[in-house]
Amino acid sequence: MTKVFKRRVSDLAINDMVDLTSCPFRRNHAMAGMVYGVVTHKEIEDANTVVIGYEGMVHISYPPDMVLHVKPAPIYLFPHELVESDHEGERNIRFFHKGSGVVINDPLMDPTGRVEVDPASEYRLTDADLKALQELNEAVDEAVNDAINAMAKSVQDHLLITTGDFAGRHFSCGRGHRKLKKVAIRYALAEIAAMKAEIVTIEEPAK
């Protein structure tokens, strides 16, 4: 059983990983069941044709409504519920561990936070899971910084201010920064939940 997104060709994005066994033009190729086709090129040729290029392969012309199977990014397959956590004054995205009934803020520690553990055996987390969670939090931090910079620039431009020194002090780790991060975290979790709802399970062997 494999979990996938079912995507119309017109909705494919660069870096999507397409299960080539779902592609009628590639499913009989010797490598179709062994590798994913990584989308590196997308061009809407006309109303009836979308050209998709896969890494290391020739471009293929598809009707825009053709449905292909896309491998979900690791964060959508995270084995635990992702939640907002405010731990020791730091707000981040962490996960809820049903077995212990607590939010795990450090996957390298047991649920009590006292004993060092192996994330794989304790929480069934792979290296890909850990990386996905880390990158999600980094993306949230980047989003908050981008929002602050854009907001400050708009105000500064209006007030004819040419230095960002005061803005840096005003937003650095203050209540405003925490509130913006809370908004960003909740938005990220909502997007993930919406995307996960689109995942379907198919009876095909995982690659």
Image: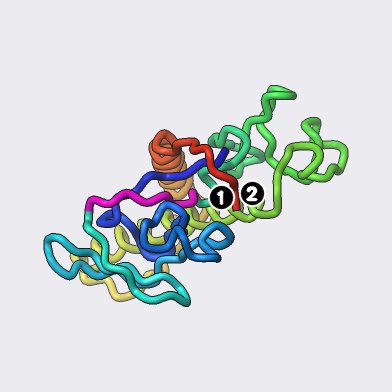
Q: What residue range appears in magenta?
A: 65-72
**Image coordinates for residue 97, horizontal then vertical, percent:** 68, 29
What residue type is disc 2 on? Asp
Q: Quadrant of residue 165?
A: bottom left
Return the residue nearer the eye: 53 or 75. 53
Residue 156 can be seen in this image: no
**Image coordinates for residue 21, horizontal then vertical, percent:** 46, 54
162 vs 204, left or right, is left
Return the residue nearer the eye: 195 or 106. 195
Tell me what residue is drawn at x 56 percent, y 50 percent.
Answer: 74
136 vs 8, left or right, is right
**Does residue 189 lie above or below 43 as drawn?**
above
Residue pointed to by mark 1: 74
Tell me if residue 67 is in the magenta stretch.
yes
Return the residue nearer the eye: 71 or 179. 71
What residue type is disc 1 on? Pro
Give neighbour class at mark 1: few <14, some 14-19, many 20+ (Cα, 10 Å).
Answer: some
Tell me what residue is drawn at x 87 percent, y 38 percent.
Answer: 115
Residue pointed to by mark 2: 129
**Does residue 8 lie above or below 179 as drawn?**
below
Is the Cβ of the residue at disc 1 closer than 8 Å to that at disc 2?
yes
Quarter of the figure with the N terminus: top right
N-terminal-most mark, 1 or 2: 1
Secondary structure of the residue carrying tag 2 is helix
